[in-house]
Amino acid sequence: MELKKRGGWSVGYEDITQGFIVSKCYVMESNIVYHSDGSNEITHKVVFPFENISCFGANDRQILGNENIPYYDACNNPRPVNVVTNLFDSYEEAKIVAEERNGKLKNNLIFEVEMSEPDWKETLEKLEKKFDKRLELCYLFEQLVLEKTSDMKISKQLSTSGQKNFVKILEPMRKQV
């Protein structure tokens, strides 16, 4: 899961990626797009139970926010969805990919530094420290999400679609009142 915070006016109100973490999710839909060169791309619409990192860590509070429960709108579209290209059977597999993506994010920090500045190395070090602190917060968020979703049950039944049998079906949790 890509954790994002809303950006302000200085970044054109675009979301800012904080980091990548591992999270269980509800798979709502899968699509295969065939390209003219013969290749294809599989995407999945998923619902992550907790994804709002905006308030997390503010004032040293560890609030996950409201849990996202999947539902269908009036047009039978799943909500609230994120589109992902990979699903994993194990935490370990997903963690490897998340670490690779976090490494790429850190490596891209160099593009934010003006090389013509006399103290560009110092600026880069500050950006890397800030990124490491942000990533530490992401990992804390990940651990709390893992704890909160530990009761999400995965059924033994596999998807029986014509393609690969790789999607296990999550059984929705019932809220206790």
Image: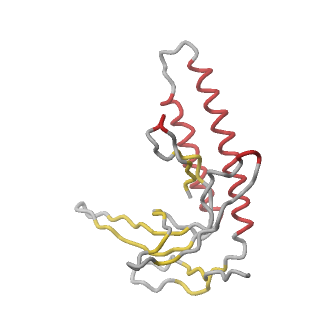
Closest to the observer, 161 or 79: 79
Q: Quadrant of residue 171?
A: bottom right
Above or below 50: residue 74 = below
At x 61% / y 55%, what residue is drawn?
Answer: 96
Q: Which residue appears farthest toward the top when viewing the image?
A: 118
Quadrant of image for the N terminus: bottom right
- 153 or 159: which is nearer to us? 153
Lateral position of residue 83 relative to residue 130, left or right: left
Please tell me in which quadrant of the rendered image residue 66 appears. Answer: bottom right
**Horizontally, is 15 left or right of 20 in the view?**
left
Count up the numbered dots: 0
Of 12 and 161, which appears nearest the observer?
12
Residue lying farthest right?
Answer: 60
**Residue situated in front as seen by the camera: 159 or 11:** 11
Where residue 30 sits: x, y (%)?
42, 73
The colouring scheme, among rainbow, by chain, secondary structure or one colour, is secondary structure
Q: Position of residue 118 (x, y in %)?
A: 55, 12
Picture coordinates of residue 149, whole percent (x, y)? 69, 70
| Residue at 31%, 63% in the rendered image | 39
In percent of width and height, residue 80 lies at 50, 68
Is 59 drawn above or below residue 91 in the view shown? above
User: Which residue: 47% across, 15% down?
Assistant: 116
Residue shown at the point (54%, 75%) measured from the top left? 70
Q: Quadrant of the C terminus?
A: bottom right
Residue 16, compared with residue 36, is above or below; it is above
